[in-house]
DNA sequence: CGTGTAAGGAATTCTGACACG
DNA sequence: CGTGTAAGGAATTCTGACACG
């Protein structure tokens, strides 16, 4: 049922490396987290850990901000996207349910 | 000409995370480097940086050592493998050169 | 609003060495 | 040989705050 967390999504990169890879300052990276645009994990000691996906996301965020988009708006985009995905997942489940009701339960 | 360094081979993981991911001690990880089995990069400050490939390699190494294989032997395996690869690359280049000589130079 | 910075502390990492077996 | 550990220091990261605009 669970999808294998590939390399791309594993949160294993510390903020210093993210700084190098993105060219952003640590201040910026932490601020985008404060504004709920990015969600690193934490080590036991409290250090932030990012994935390669996070790094790509950070660069997109930085681009938008350079274009004058406010973090608030970027946040809304994210929320909207997530909502759309949730709806699709729900619809898929409902259709599957109907299919099962009509033609019997089947694994897969 | 260069191959894109994929996520798997990018050296971005600090030793603490490697410890968590592999279950090895930092002492072990550093020792395998001392024995030339693993080659992390360094940050400007001197911290070691590993890739996901390195992590997989470390676990293979640890398994062999558990089986009683000595680091010296593991090192030899690595050297032999590399040599084989180098030879193949040379042969490929030579064949390509002959083809080009016979049928004219062509890109790709 | 988004970012820089100085401040103080805590977690992380480094090296070289001693120990054991 | 492979690994644990204590030691001391340096690099890294953290938070909360003040500043600017």
Image (tube, coloured by chain):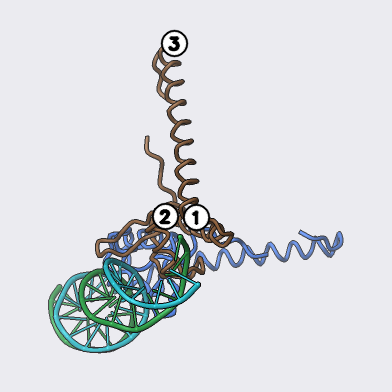
Chain colours: A blue, B brown, C cyan, D green
The secondary element bearing badge 3 is classed as helix
Mark 3 or mark 2: name the one nearer the start of the chain. Answer: 2
The crowding category of the residue bearing disc 3, from other C-alpha atoms within 10 Å (few below 14, some 14 to 19, many at least 20), is few
The answer for how far apart the CA atoms under marks 3 and 2 are is 42 Å
Mark on residue B57?
A: 1
- Give whichever of A29, B82 is nearer the camera: B82
**The N terminus of chain B is located in which quarter?**
top left
The answer for how far apart the CA atoms under marks 2 and 1 are is 8 Å
Q: Residue at x 42, y 55 (%)?
A: B38
Query: Which residue corresponds to mark 3?
Result: B102
Chain identity of mark 3: B
Q: Residue furthest top?
A: B102
Q: Is residue A77 visible?
A: no
Mark on residue B2?
A: none
State left or right for residue B43 relative to residue A50: left
Q: Are marks 2 and 1 in contact (CB under 8 Å)?
A: yes
Q: Quadrant of residue A14?
A: bottom left
The crowding category of the residue bearing disc 1, from other C-alpha atoms within 10 Å (few below 14, some 14 to 19, many at least 20), is some
* Foreground label between 3 and 2: 2
Residue B94: percent from the left, percent from the top? 43, 22
Mark 3 or mark 1: name the one nearer the start of the chain. Answer: 1
Compared to residue A7, the image places residue A49 above or below, namely below
Query: Which residue corresponds to mark 2?
Result: B38
The answer for how far apart the CA atoms under marks 3 and 1 are is 42 Å
Residue A48: percent from the left, percent from the top? 39, 73
**The C terminus of chain B is located in which quarter?**
top left
- Give whichever of D4, A22 is nearer the camera: D4
* Foreground label between 3 and 1: 1
Mark 2 or mark 1: name the one nearer the start of the chain. Answer: 2
Is the same chain shared between marks 3 and 1? yes
Count of labels in the image: 3
Q: Are marks 3 and 1 in contact (CB under 8 Å)?
A: no
């Amino acid at each position: 049922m669970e999808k294998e967390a590939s390399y791309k999504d594993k949160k294993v990169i510390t903020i210093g490396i993210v700084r190098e890879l993105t060219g952003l300052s640590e201040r910026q990276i932490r601020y985008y987290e404060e504004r709920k645009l990015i969600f690193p994990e934490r080590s036991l000691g409290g250090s932030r850990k990012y994935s390669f996906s996070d790094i790509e996301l950070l660069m997109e965020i930085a681009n938008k901000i350079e274009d004058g988009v406010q973090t608030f708006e970027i946040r809304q985009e994210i929320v909207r996207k997530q909502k759309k995905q949730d709806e699709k997942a729900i619809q898929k489940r409902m259709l599957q349910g109907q299919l099962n009701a009509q033609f019997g339960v089947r694994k897969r």
